[in-house]
Image (spheres, helix red, strand yellow):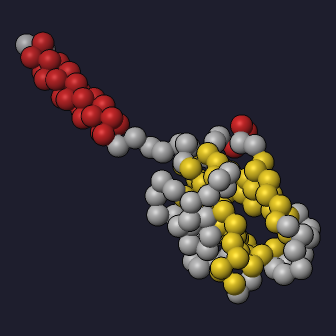
Protein backbone atom coordinates (compact mmCIF):
# COMPACT_ATOMS: atom_id res chain seq x y z
CA UNK A 1 0.00 0.00 0.00
CA UNK A 2 2.90 2.39 0.66
CA UNK A 3 5.05 1.21 -2.25
CA UNK A 4 2.98 2.95 -4.92
CA UNK A 5 3.07 6.49 -3.43
CA UNK A 6 6.81 6.20 -2.76
CA UNK A 7 7.40 5.14 -6.35
CA UNK A 8 5.46 8.14 -7.64
CA UNK A 9 7.51 10.41 -5.39
CA UNK A 10 10.75 8.96 -6.74
CA UNK A 11 9.55 9.34 -10.33
CA UNK A 12 8.67 12.97 -9.62
CA UNK A 13 12.14 13.68 -8.20
CA UNK A 14 13.86 11.83 -11.04
CA UNK A 15 11.95 13.98 -13.54
CA UNK A 16 12.97 17.18 -11.72
CA UNK A 17 16.57 16.01 -11.60
CA UNK A 18 16.52 15.27 -15.33
CA UNK A 19 15.17 18.77 -16.06
CA UNK A 20 17.92 20.29 -13.90
CA UNK A 21 20.62 18.38 -15.75
CA UNK A 22 19.23 19.40 -19.14
CA UNK A 23 19.06 23.06 -18.16
CA UNK A 24 22.65 22.95 -16.88
CA UNK A 25 23.89 21.45 -20.14
CA UNK A 26 21.87 23.85 -22.30
CA UNK A 27 22.79 27.06 -20.43
CA UNK A 28 26.36 26.94 -19.11
CA UNK A 29 27.53 29.90 -17.06
CA UNK A 30 30.54 31.83 -18.40
CA UNK A 31 33.47 31.78 -16.01
CA UNK A 32 34.56 35.19 -14.75
CA UNK A 33 37.98 36.27 -15.88
CA UNK A 34 40.06 39.42 -16.00
CA UNK A 35 42.75 41.04 -18.08
CA UNK A 36 45.18 43.75 -16.99
CA UNK A 37 46.97 46.28 -19.17
CA UNK A 38 49.69 48.82 -18.34
CA UNK A 39 49.87 51.68 -20.83
CA UNK A 40 52.66 54.26 -20.87
CA UNK A 41 52.60 57.35 -23.09
CA UNK A 42 55.99 58.84 -24.05
CA UNK A 43 54.53 61.19 -26.66
CA UNK A 44 53.99 64.93 -26.26
CA UNK A 45 50.25 64.54 -26.99
CA UNK A 46 47.63 62.67 -24.95
CA UNK A 47 46.76 59.18 -26.17
CA UNK A 48 43.22 57.81 -26.00
CA UNK A 49 42.76 54.06 -25.51
CA UNK A 50 39.89 51.57 -25.73
CA UNK A 51 39.83 47.80 -25.31
CA UNK A 52 37.74 45.64 -27.65
CA UNK A 53 36.55 42.05 -27.58
CA UNK A 54 37.08 40.31 -30.90
CA UNK A 55 34.66 37.56 -29.80
CA UNK A 56 31.55 39.66 -29.03
CA UNK A 57 30.25 43.23 -29.27
CA UNK A 58 31.91 44.61 -26.13
CA UNK A 59 34.41 47.36 -25.42
CA UNK A 60 35.94 48.94 -22.32
CA UNK A 61 35.41 51.37 -20.83
CA UNK A 62 31.78 51.39 -21.91
CA UNK A 63 29.26 54.20 -22.40
CA UNK A 64 31.43 56.07 -24.93
CA UNK A 65 34.21 56.71 -22.40
CA UNK A 66 37.98 56.32 -22.97
CA UNK A 67 41.13 55.57 -21.05
CA UNK A 68 43.15 58.80 -21.37
CA UNK A 69 46.95 58.85 -21.08
CA UNK A 70 47.72 62.55 -20.61
CA UNK A 71 51.31 62.19 -19.36
CA UNK A 72 54.16 59.67 -19.14
CA UNK A 73 52.98 58.03 -15.90
CA UNK A 74 52.23 54.32 -16.40
CA UNK A 75 48.51 53.59 -16.07
CA UNK A 76 47.10 50.18 -15.13
CA UNK A 77 43.63 49.13 -16.28
CA UNK A 78 41.91 45.84 -15.45
CA UNK A 79 38.65 44.74 -17.01
CA UNK A 80 36.34 41.82 -16.41
CA UNK A 81 35.87 39.56 -19.41
CA UNK A 82 34.93 36.01 -20.33
CA UNK A 83 37.48 33.23 -19.89
CA UNK A 84 39.29 32.64 -23.21
CA UNK A 85 37.96 35.84 -24.77
CA UNK A 86 40.36 37.66 -27.12
CA UNK A 87 40.85 41.31 -26.10
CA UNK A 88 42.61 43.88 -28.31
CA UNK A 89 43.61 47.46 -27.60
CA UNK A 90 43.08 50.40 -29.91
CA UNK A 91 44.83 53.71 -29.27
CA UNK A 92 45.17 57.02 -31.06
CA UNK A 93 46.46 60.53 -30.54
CA UNK A 94 43.85 62.79 -28.96
CA UNK A 95 41.57 64.16 -31.68
CA UNK A 96 43.43 62.41 -34.54
CA UNK A 97 42.18 58.93 -35.41
CA UNK A 98 44.54 58.71 -38.42
CA UNK A 99 47.52 58.18 -36.08
CA UNK A 100 46.64 54.98 -34.28
CA UNK A 101 48.10 51.85 -32.70
CA UNK A 102 46.61 48.40 -32.37
CA UNK A 103 43.09 48.02 -33.69
CA UNK A 104 42.33 51.77 -33.86
CA UNK A 105 39.54 53.85 -32.36
CA UNK A 106 36.73 51.42 -33.23
CA UNK A 107 38.63 48.14 -32.93
CA UNK A 108 38.26 47.44 -36.67
CA UNK A 109 41.88 47.37 -37.88
CA UNK A 110 44.07 44.28 -38.07
CA UNK A 111 47.06 44.45 -35.79
CA UNK A 112 50.17 42.51 -34.84
CA UNK A 113 50.67 41.87 -31.12
CA UNK A 114 47.79 44.06 -29.92
CA UNK A 115 45.58 41.26 -28.60
CA UNK A 116 45.75 38.88 -25.67
CA UNK A 117 43.52 36.22 -24.11
CA UNK A 118 41.42 36.80 -21.00
CA UNK A 119 42.40 34.47 -18.15
CA UNK A 120 41.53 33.66 -14.55
CA UNK A 121 42.68 36.73 -12.54
CA UNK A 122 45.37 34.91 -10.53
CA UNK A 123 46.93 33.59 -13.76
CA UNK A 124 46.52 36.70 -15.92
CA UNK A 125 49.82 38.40 -16.83
CA UNK A 126 50.10 42.17 -17.06
CA UNK A 127 50.01 43.16 -20.74
CA UNK A 128 52.34 46.16 -21.20
CA UNK A 129 52.15 48.71 -24.03
CA UNK A 130 54.33 51.81 -24.49
CA UNK A 131 53.52 54.52 -27.01
CA UNK A 132 56.56 56.34 -28.47
> Quick check: 70 left or right of 20?
right
Q: Where is residue 123 in the image (x, y as percent from the top left)?
A: 71, 37
User: Residue at 48% across / 53% down in the picture?
Assistant: 55
Q: Could you say which quadrant of the image residue 7 lies in?
A: top left
Out of 108 and 76, give the one closest to the viewer. Answer: 108
Tag count: 0
Can residue 69 be seen here? The reply is: yes
Residue sitting nearer the eye, 59 or 111: 111
Placement of 74 over or under 113, stated as above or below? below
Q: Quadrant of residue 110?
A: bottom right
**Is 9 on the left or on the right of 104, as rendered?**
left
Task: Name the spot of residue 39 as percent of width and height, x first.
Answer: 80, 62
Tell me if residue 20 comes above or below residue 14 in the rendering: below
Q: Residue 119 appears at what percent x and percent y?
A: 63, 42
- Most distant residue in the bottom direction: 95
State which quarter of the image contains the C terminus. bottom right
The residue lying at 24 percent from left, 29 percent from top is 18
Residue at 61% x, 64% y: name it: 103
**Quick check: 117 above or below 92?**
above
Q: Is residue 80 visible?
A: no
Q: What is the quadrant of the N terminus in the image?
A: top left
Is 124 left, or right, of 84 in this rendering?
right
Image point 72% across, 57% down: which residue? 78
Relative height, residue 118 to residue 51 (above, below): above
Amino acid sequence: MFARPMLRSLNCCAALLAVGIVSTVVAPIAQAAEISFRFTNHLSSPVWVKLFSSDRLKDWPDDGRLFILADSSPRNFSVGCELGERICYGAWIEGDITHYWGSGNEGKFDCDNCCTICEIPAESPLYQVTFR
